[in-house]
Image (spheres, rainbow, N blue to C red):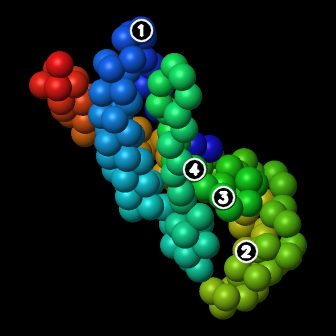
Amino acid sequence: MEYAFTFVRGDRYPWFQETVRQEELVAAQEFIDIAKSTIISNSPVDLGTFVESITGEIIEDSTGTSGSVYSTDDEIKVAVIEGGRQPGTYPPVDVITEWALRHGIPPFLAGRAIFLNGIAPLRPFGKTQDQIQPQIDDINARLMSRIAERL
């Protein structure tokens, strides 16, 4: 699961592309900072490993700048946090045992509750997109304004 964005450069003038590239990098870092902090604030905290795994990266190529914010944590764990877990299957014994004992719950009861009820999705990535859209629009407007000022 990730939150991603792309700026596409279309102009052929080298001086213009460099100006746009510089401004894109500033905007891209703003995107990453806002998305990362919002994803973290929407995330569950047990041991903190999921929150600590949220990271971002900016990628540049000849056509533009792109970036994403994502988790480096276990893919299954991230998928369950984002999308939940349907009832009808037991969670992995080692994972639920560790979690249940840490919270003072008999592991069988925790596993049985998940089997019967599933796990509700928390959607830290999905919620983020909805929450930060006004800020993203503002970053895009400032990007265009800064580029226009430099022309």
Residue density around tag 3, few if under 14, some if 14–19, many if 20 or more, within 10 Å: some
Label 4, label 3: how far apart the Cα atoms are: 7 Å
Residue density around tag 2, few if under 14, some if 14–19, many if 20 or more, within 10 Å: some
Q: Earlier in the sequence, mark 4 or mark 2?
A: 4
In the drawing, what numbered circle is on residue 12? 1
Label 2, label 1: how far apart the Cα atoms are: 60 Å
In the drawing, what numbered circle is on residue 72? 3
Could you tell whether 93 is left or right of 48 in the image? right
Rendered residue at 68%/61% (across/down): 73
User: Picture quarter containing residue 50?
Assistant: bottom right
Which residue is denoted by mark 2 in the rendering? 110
Residue 110: image location, x then y, percent: 73, 74
Which residue is denoted by mark 4 in the rendering? 70
Q: Is residue 61 above or below residue 45?
A: above
Under circle 3, the secondary element is: loop
Residue 120 shows up from this direction:
no
What's under tag 4, amino acid-wise? Answer: Tyr
Residue density around tag 4, few if under 14, some if 14–19, many if 20 or more, within 10 Å: many
What's under tag 2, amino acid-wise? Answer: Ala
Under circle 2, the secondary element is: helix
